[in-house]
Image (cartoon, rainbow, N blue to C red):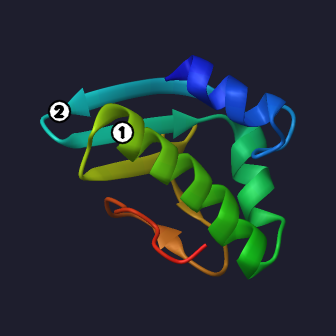
Amino acid sequence: AKNIVSLLVSENALPEGCALLSFTIEGKNGHADMNNAYGDAITLTGTAGEYMRVGCLVNTLLVFYDLDTITLTVEGQTITTGHVIYDSPLRFYENF
């Protein structure tokens, strides 16, 4: 999973400095804990940028690992952006 995130960064799908700290799977559910750079990348952007960066990460991990949901955190904490509080599992983002 860390290599997937690194590839998303190298392809400019996620900003430079974003990194996965840990990734766990329990059944069909995943949990991705990202670094502060990722938190900044989604909280310091507009609604569309946030949607794209969260959706890009969530969809990639869901498809690659054949999961139903992903829970995202930053440095172990719930992500709050001003637009959304990411405190529940996320499903596939349909509208890109």
Classify residue 15 by image quadrant.
top right
In the image, residue 54 above or below residue 8: below
On screen, residue 84 versus residue 89, left or right, reads right
Residue 32 coordinates in the image, percent (x, y)? 45, 37
In the image, residue 42 above or below residue 85: above
10 Å neighbourhood of mark 2: few (<14), some, or many (≥20)? Answer: few
Residue 12 coordinates in the image, percent (x, y)? 84, 42
**Which of the labelled discs sits on residue 39, or is there none?**
none
Q: Residue at x 47, y 52 (%)?
A: 59
In the image, residue 58 above or below residue 95: above
**SS of the residue under disc 1:** strand
Three-letter amino acid code at the position of disc 2 = Glu
Q: Residue at x 74, y 64 (%)?
A: 43
- In space, the residues marked 1 and 2 are separated at their CA atoms by 8 Å
10 Å neighbourhood of mark 1: few (<14), some, or many (≥20)? Answer: some
Residue 69 coordinates in the image, percent (x, y)? 29, 53
Marks 1,2: beta carbons within 8 A: yes
On screen, residue 49 versus residue 73, left or right, reads right
Three-letter amino acid code at the position of disc 1 = His
**Residue that numbered label 1 is attached to:** 31
**Residue that numbered label 2 is attached to:** 26
Residue 7 coordinates in the image, percent (x, y)? 70, 26
